[in-house]
Amino acid sequence: MMLQFPYHRTGFKRHSVLCSRTNETESKSTGGSKTETTHEPPSFLFFADFMGKRTYDSEGNTVGIVYDVAFSLSEIYPKATCLILRAPGFFRHRYSEIPWNRIKKLSPYIELDLPLKMIKFYYQFGGQDLRLRRDILDKQVVDTNNHKVIRVNDIHLLEVDHELRIAHVDVGIRGLVRRLGWQPVVDFLVAGLLPRTTYFKERFISWKFIQPLSLNHKSGALKLTVPEKQLAQIPHSDFREVMSNMDIYQRTAFFRSLTLDLRVQIFRDLDTDTQQKLLEHIDLAEAAYILSRIPADQATDILERLPKSVSEKLLNFMETTQARKLSTLLGYTSDSAGGIMTTEMVTLPHSAKVQDVVQVFQQVPESLEATTFIFLIESDNRLSGMVPARKLLLAKPEDPLTQYALPKTTYVKVKDTLREVAFQMEFHKIPVIPVVNNGKDKILQGVITVDDVLKHLIPIAWKRRAKKPSP
């Protein structure tokens, strides 16, 4: 499936003919009747070949040529509802929207069951239905099946029982050649010069894997037609590559069209630059909600990059407890233990038992990274021990957690340098280390994972390597 961001042209609403309404009312007002359905064998055609087809009225007069086709998205394979014709002429083109039930035949030319005098033309036209030329053809789209951005070169249509439906989109080079009108010549040359080429291999993507987006540029609103369950099946990490190929307006519109929970999950996996740009284009309440649902250390990194006035406004929108945590983290320098720690961890009272761990882990969010250790605390939040979670796999439910705690509790202080943190983790061979206020009180402040350390050390290492003179 695909997600597509079209640029809509808006027309005068009072001049716009609504296809869905006209389908029902046109025959009543004119005394016409619907075309009888004949069960003919289905046939395929390309939109590139359909565009520009001459259209005649019921008396054989030329009406115009096919400019676009409107489709309803109410079904899996959209059905044509309206034919947009362009009147003959070279200047100030005029357009007419013909309801699909007034089309008598499609091949070899298009014939209507209306006389020319009953067809009205306007200089502009609107409409909210899907338009192939306006919304799909030659537009950048997101293939969420293969998780990459591509461009549609042509649309494969199916004609069956006098209905026209979208079957596939063509993303191959041959589709572009066909649309430019060069296919007979290019096919002949390629067949003679490059007999083993993949040029003739059709690159179709079924419409059921395509989901267009309708973007209203006046309001910035975007309507997502893909079911959220279907969209949620895409790995969140793949959205980084998908969204990187969109401009900021498309990216913001797409992001805001998702459910709030899905936004949080996707936001967490984006790079910091993309996160910052998104926050600058969404309202403060929404931004504050997202920041309060991601790991605290990640939220702190983002807040540090924003102007101080913006960070303060975001903290004011958050819940008091979460805002206090982030404010505390912002008070530490970025190269200290307090600056890189997260306040999200698994803690239990010193007197807890193994069976208590199961209840706690059932409530732990998936975003929590530091789950390899359970930290034991006294009533005043003083660190008293740390238990490796893997040791509890074969433990008895009634066993006290202190029975499986490490002989010595290793920790760092909030003002310790990044180098000291890395040294302690490497020396004791632990992937997570607790952070306390000082060596005397040992009040637990947060934890640091090995990923947090590497995230800060790797850029420093690359900078030093860049400064090192080459031999």
Image (spheres, rainbow, N blue to C red):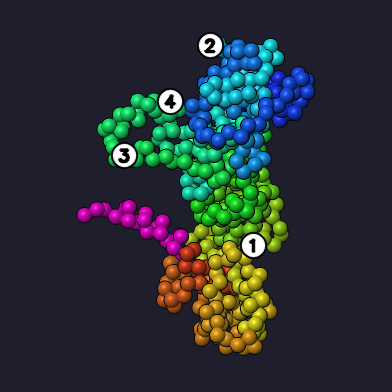
Q: Nearer the viewer, residue 296 or 140?
A: 140
Residue located farthest toward the left when viewing the structure as drawn: 471
Mark 3 or mark 2, which has the lower sequence index? 2
Please identify the quarter of the rendering in which residue 444 is found: bottom right
Can you say whether 426 is above or below 330 in the image?
Answer: below
Q: Nearer the viewer, mark 1 or mark 2?
A: 2
The kind of residue tagged 1 is Lys
* Pointers 4 and 1 in contact (C-beta within 8 Å): no
Percent x, y for residue 442? 59, 76
The kind of residue tagged 4 is Leu
In the rendered view, does 21 fall on the left or right side of 327? Answer: right
Tell me the residue that label 1 is attached to: 325
Please identify the quarter of the rendering in which residue 343 is found: bottom right
Which residue is painted at 55% across and 69% down in the image? Answer: 370
Q: Main secondary structure of the magenta part?
A: helix
Residue 180, label in figure: 4
Q: CA distance from mark 4 to mark 2?
A: 20 Å
Mark 4 or mark 3, which has the lower sequence index? 4
Q: Nearer the viewer, mark 3 or mark 2?
A: 3
Mark 1 or mark 2, which has the lower sequence index? 2
In reply to whether residue 468 is colored magenta, the answer given is yes
Percent x, y for residue 431? 47, 72
Tell me the residue that label 2 is attached to: 90
What secondary structure is marked by label 2?
Answer: loop
Q: CA distance from mark 4 to mark 3?
A: 20 Å
